Amino acid sequence: MSATGIENKGIDGDFFNFLCHQWESAPIHQTMDLRLIYLGPGEAGIKIHPGREYTTIRGRLHGGISAALADTAMGWAILTLGRNCVTVDMYTNYIAPAFGEHDLTAEAQVVHSGNRTVVAEATLCNGRGELVAKSRGTFSLKRGKMQAFEQDNP
């Protein structure tokens, strides 16, 4: 466990610290109050405790918030492999409702890594561990490695 409380599941220490710094630098993570739980080679876990501002009039979590959580988790699973990416296509199957004021956790893993694209999947579960949604995405790899890390760590 790092000083920030993020679990390292087998990533090089310097690269892990770089990724943690990148996580903390992204405004969207603060805006949505996303919490990084763990990073491992090709995997990531992220949690949100969504407030009422993310719910529908029935108190259910808006599906776009769940999709954003899944997309973020899949993107970070890919980043653990040292590759920058952008989402090309993503779909989410909503299996059960999620509710505001209750934790929602996304666990993502890379299922295929090619030269130009990567496919990742994410599972979203509520605080009781019940399946809420599953997502799958295709991501286009940006050329080269993560330059900022490469420049700082020759």
Image (tube, rainbow, N blue to C red):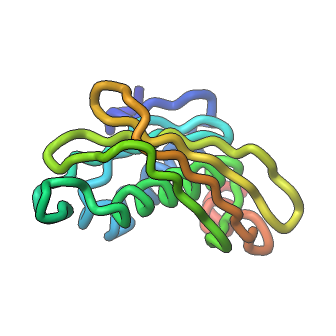
In the depicted structure, whether residue 65 falls above or below residue 140: above
Front-most of 151 and 134?
A: 134
Q: Seen in the image, is 100 located left or right of residue 75? A: left
In the depicted structure, whether residue 39 falls above or below residue 79: above
Which residue is situated farthest in the right direction here?
A: 115
Residue 34 picture location, percent across and down: 31, 53
In the depicted structure, whether residue 50 falls above or below residue 84: above
Q: Quadrant of the N terminus?
A: top left
Residue 123 picture location, percent across and down: 51, 41
Q: Seen in the image, is 142 located left or right of residue 71? A: right
Front-most of 42 and 59?
A: 59
Front-most of 110 and 91?
A: 91
Residue 91 picture location, percent across and down: 58, 62
Q: Residue at x 88, y 62 (%)?
A: 115
Q: Seen in the image, is 76 located left or right of residue 142? A: left
Q: Residue at x 53, y 46 (%)?
A: 134
In the depicted structure, whether residue 107 falls above or below residue 67: above
Q: Quadrant of the C terminus?
A: bottom right
